Amino acid sequence: MEVRLLDLSRQYRGIAEEVRAAVDAVFGDCAFILGRRVAEFEAAVAAYCGVKYAVGVASGTDALLLSLRALGVEHGEEVITTPYTFFATAGAVWNAGGRPVFVDIDPATFNLDPGRIEDAVTERTKVILPVHLFGQVADMDPIREIAERRGLRILEDAAQAIGARYHGRRAGRFGDLTGFSFFPSKNLGAAGDGGMVVTDDEDLAAAVRALRAHGGRDRYVHEVVGYNSRLDALQAAVLSVKLPHLDEWSEGRRRHAALYDEAFRGMEEVTPPPVPPGHVPIYNQYVIRCRDRDGFKAFLADRGVGTAIYYPRPLHLQECFRGLGYREGDFPEAERAAAETLSLPVYAELTEAEQNHVIESIRAFYAGRAG
Ligand SMILES: Cc1ncc(COP(=O)(O)O)c(C=O)c1O
């Protein structure tokens, strides 16, 4: 049996007619750039997150970049973030003109460890950039407390976490600004690249809106140099079809996660991802820690089970950031996570038989090793 890590065609089959009609409608009036469809989707995301403003941009990476620019990060000002995330988190800081300052993760949640943030704050620190990794919100109460006390801004990297809840509120409610990604593999995925910035701050929303269109607030009048980074009307049309299904798809992922949790209970070789009280994750990835990760991954591949390593090399050890002066051993928890974790298939349309095959294969690997 083949079980892919993600099969987007199954989701598409369920909504194909609606998606095609939405795409046809865009071609009906050929309004491709911004306009009504983008504005309607922005309003729908703002309402979904419970915030006042949403600005559609070209990708999740740009959502972060434009947010950092809107916050005025420049000239090597410091942005505290995690080394255990997708590259774009720190790449956006760099491209905005800031300096990423890494802080190790909490080994239980894989998210920024609030207890270590304060030691990294200097007079050049401007922003804290927590990532809601794998679809679980970072521990935002202590992070907000530090930011308020030290006069710092917060940008949430919620690229993987649209709809994830923390003490009853959805991602997007905990920072000055929040960036979402609609990369196709996200819980709310476009038919290509797309992203969104949400905020309750009218001025920041206006700044991002200007930055996505070359920095001009009025046509042909530019106070700052911006980008061409708009969400396409075609993507907004597709995403508007998908948004009403998002919660049901995330609920499907939570059901699969609960079955895995149950199956791995008592297995000492596999640690399921813990969910602290007050959190409702969306499981953009279901990531376990496991013994002999690489042998285990190869064994699963032989049995037709697709898995992935998110992320094999922490960002402080990337060649491009060598100039920041970090070394191996600086962030032991991030390095350990990079060596021990594996992402299993968890998408909503996964069948019971497929999930059972994954679970049985995992049991077989460790049973074989014990014997
Ligand atoms: C944590 C994180 N940040 C940023 C991004 C960047 O998003 P995009 O691929 O839409 O540019 C991604 C996703 O790819 C991500 O997972």
Image (cartoon, rainbow, N blue to C red):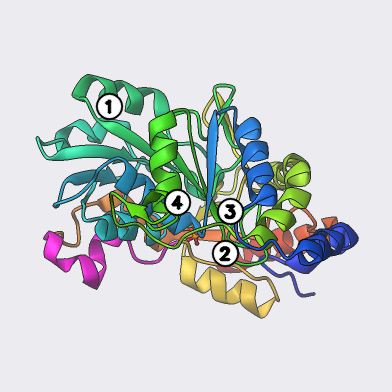
Q: Is mark 2 within 8 Å of ligand 1?
A: yes
Q: Are there few (<14), some (14-19), or many (20+) residues within 10 Å of tag 3?
A: many
Distance from disc 1 to disc 4, alpha carbons, whole Å, reads 21 Å
Mark 2 and mark 4 lie on one chain; the one further toward the N terminus is 4
Classified by dominant secondary structure, the portion drawn in magenta counts as helix
Left-right relation of 17 to 209: right
List the residue tagged with mark 2: 193
Q: What stretch is highlighted in magenta?
A: 311-325
Query: Label 1: few (<14), some or many (≥20) within 10 Å?
Result: many
- Pointer 3 or 4: first along the chain: 4
- Work out how far the residue at label 2 is from the one at label 3, CA to CA, in angstroms: 19 Å
Mark in front: 2 vs 3: 2
Does 148 appear above or below 118? above
For ligand 1, tell me if the residue under mark 3 lies within 8 Å: no
Q: Position of residue 316 (x, y in %)?
A: 24, 60
Mark 3 sits on what residue? 285
Q: Is residue 141 left or right of residue 124?
A: right
Mark 1 element type: helix
Q: Position of residue 193 (x, y in %)?
A: 57, 64
Provide the residue designation for mark 1. 147
Of pointers 1 and 3, the one earlier in the residue sequence: 1
